[in-house]
Amino acid sequence: MDFSLTPEQEALVETARAFARDHLKPNYRLRDQEGRMDRPTLKRMGELGLFGIELPEEIGGLGQDCLTAGLVVEALCGEDLNIGYVTINASLDAQIMRSFGTPDVVDPWIRGMLSGELIASIALTEPGGGSDAANLKLRARRDGDDYIIDGEKTSISLADQADFTVAFARTGTTEARAKGISSFLIPLDLPGISRTSFDDHGGRSVGRGSLFFDNVRVPASHLLGTENAGFSQVMAGFDYSRALLGILCLSVARVSLDAAWKYTNERFTFGKPLSEYQGVTFPLAEAETQWAGARLLCLQTLWLKDRGLPHTAEAAMCKWWGPKLAYDIVNTCLLTHGHGGYSKDMPFEQRLRDLLGLQIGDGTAQIMKMVIARQKTKA
Ligand SMILES: Cc1cc2nc3c(=O)[nH]c(=O)nc-3n(C[C@H](O)[C@H](O)[C@H](O)COP(=O)(O)OP(=O)(O)OC[C@H]3O[C@@H](n4cnc5c(N)ncnc54)[C@H](O)[C@@H]3O)c2cc1C
């Protein structure tokens, strides 16, 4: 087992880390206040090759493995977790689009996404189906060379900023459940589409909202894969995004822990630095231990994916443990900073707000534990 990075991985990680330090960290709070991603920053990330690391070079990626993509997400997103929604959406959508779409149709969208010019969303959740994701009502019916889409998607990240979405719609009967769902690439400027946004606790630069489809005509060429096979397509992708989301959240815990350790040397109480008090350092030491274990799990999951080995249970472990542990660690780090940590002048309260959303988005802890249990009990 080799834990060292290749020179190429080191160079990519260093590029991402420098970009985070120089371009993402300074405006973390501003983006939260403005409630928007800033497009020039995304474009700069595209120029540096920070989207779709794992996609082939001919389509605008870097042709790296998924483990390297995870290391880049980790280096990039500790200072602003929200950027991770854009990078992970790009990876998840591009994987589905490349595997199942017609190249002439999907390639320009993938290129736009990887260059940072286009923002992608993924639209699965509906008012009646979140955890019960196969319970979809959004309807797509064939009409000549088009499909006509009707219904609502809700709780969609980047809903009011995205240029296009990969959406899941019912093409079969309701009784067919998962086997009656298809996926479509839908440009979000088509006639009949409207959007709303929510007033969320965190993740405010990403934003969440609903997408309404009223008799929206989508060319049949935008069907991704075959009719009624859409559900399994997205579920396979989730094993990847769950590992990335785990390491994404842990990267926020990492920068918080680094700041907290530093502070224990700087702050004196009762004539001694905080680092002299085990009541302060032991919670941080425990956090370090759990952080190291969870991070290794995420890297191992990506390693399994790169080798084509089963990793559904491991990915679900990353998705429930990473966001929960990161939230708890950042909470400890906030408390370590005393009253200053509670202020908006420090990033901890925003980090907590941002992290909380990822305990729900992409599947809750209960659903992840169901996935793990199902994997462990199947014959
Ligand atoms: C920040 C954020 C970003 C999101 N981004 C997107 C996105 O981009 N695209 C998208 O499609 N969706 C997105 N979602 C939606 C997200 O995937 C759903 O919210 C999630 O899957 C849970 O569904 P629900 O909210 O309908 O909760 P429900 O399914 O109604 O569940 C409610 C509660 O009951 C629990 N529960 C439900 N069923 C069971 C069960 N069988 N056993 C035990 N517990 C159960 C759940 O864990 C949860 O705690 C996002 C959500 C958030 C918060």
Image (cartoon, rainbow, N blue to C red):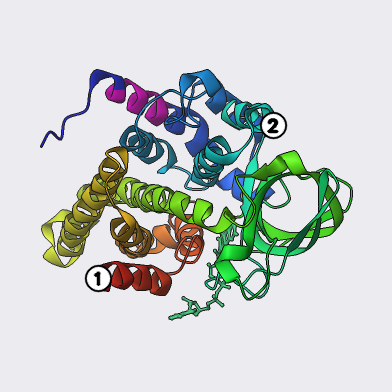
The C terminus sits in image quarter: bottom left
Query: Which circle, 2 or 1, is nearer the viewer?
Result: 1
Residue 364 can be seen, yes or no: yes
Quarter-of-image position of residue 103: top right
Along the line of sight, the residue nearer the viewer: 70 or 16 = 70
**Which disc is residue 379 wearing?**
1
Residue 191, horizontal then vertical, whole percent: 89, 47
User: Residue type at mark 2?
Assistant: Val
Q: What residue is disc 2 on? A: 105
SS assignment at label 1? loop
Q: Is residue 163 visible?
A: no
Closest to the observer, 26 or 365:
365
Mark 2, other Cα within 10 Å: few <14 / some 14–19 / many ≥20: some
Magenta stretch: dominant secondary structure = helix
| Residue plotted at (19% across, 54% down) | 293
Which x, y percent locates residue 303? 26, 41
Q: Which residues are magenta?
A: 9-18
Q: Is residue 62 left or right of residue 103?
A: left
Q: Is residue 153 above or below residue 34?
A: below
**Whole-percent x and y of residue 60?**
53, 22
> Residue, x 46% and y 29% (percent of image)?
55
* Amino acid at the residue labelled 1: Ala
Q: Which x, y percent locates residue 304?
A: 26, 45
- Residue 27 lies within the magenta run: no
Q: Nearer the viewer, residue 186 or 143?
A: 143
Q: Is residue 15 magenta?
A: yes
